[in-house]
Image (spheres, grey):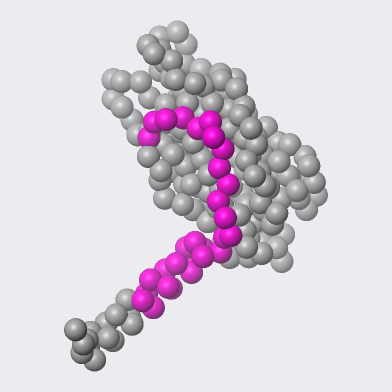
Amino acid sequence: MELGAGAKLLLLLLWATCRRHASADGLGGYTSVIRVTNGGPWGDWAWPEMCPEGFFARGFSLKVEPPQGALGDDTALNGIRLHCVGRNAALDTHVVESESGRWGAWREPLWCPGGGFLVAFSLRVEVPVTPGDNTAANNVRFRCSDGTELQGPGLTWGKFGGWSEPCPKGLCGLQTKIQRPEGLLDDTALNDARFFCCRS
């Protein structure tokens, strides 16, 4: 069916709008996604969040709920933030965060030394226990471009899995898998994460 001039114009405007939004949220500025294989099984993937164009992650911070005691419901790791720095403006920083759980508090950021940047990650995850108080992801560690390893101030349940593939030019975005509050049932909050590799 032949489209009329008005329909063609509308399609062109929609295409331009979508292209502008994709550029604005930075989703076109990555080359690949890095993952680990030991993430928790609960929850759904939230929206991705990207560093501004020309920025890359030099540091990170975690949202952690402390142990709740024998009768409490532990969720451990609730959120991850990337601290992005402009390649041409080292003092200009931007914080990005995908969805986070509701419990805990944000801890102080950890930074790669010198001009280093984050290139790979590993998750500490507690395997599911039935019955029991599941926590899923408990902590995360990152490797910097100079080989330095930064371990977050998360909790100690579970164990670290293998390292993700590296991003040669650094990380420039993240996406988290979050279980939303379950009411009277067992909560786990953050279960998994994946990161976007910078294009340049």
Judge whether 26 appears above or below 35 on screen.
below
Q: Residue at x 71, y 41 (%)?
A: 143
Indicate the quadrant where residue 140 lies: top right
Instruction: Classify residue 108 as left or right of residue 183.
Output: right
Direction top: furthest residue: 70
Instruction: Classify residue 187 as left or right of residue 68.
Output: left
Count the numbered circles shown.
Answer: 0
Q: Is residue 69 something that shows in the picture?
A: yes
Q: Residue at x 21, y 87 (%)?
A: 2
Judge whether 4 appears above or below 36 on screen.
below
Direction front: furthest residue: 1
Quadrant of image for the C terminus: bottom right
Instruction: Classify residue 45 as left or right of residue 33.
Output: left
Q: Is residue 154 something that shows in the picture?
A: no
Give the extent of the magenta segment. Answer: 15-43
Q: Nearer the viewer, residue 58 or 31?
A: 31
Quadrant of image for the N terminus: bottom left
Q: Nearer the viewer, residue 34 or 20?
A: 34
- Residue 12: % across, % down: 33, 82
- Residue 144: % across, % down: 73, 44
Q: Is residue 17 magenta?
A: yes
Q: Residue at x 46, y 23 (%)?
A: 135
- Residue 131: % across, % down: 37, 11
Judge whether 169 appears above or below 4 on screen.
above
Q: Is residue 147 magenta?
A: no
Judge whether 144 appears above or below 138 on screen.
below
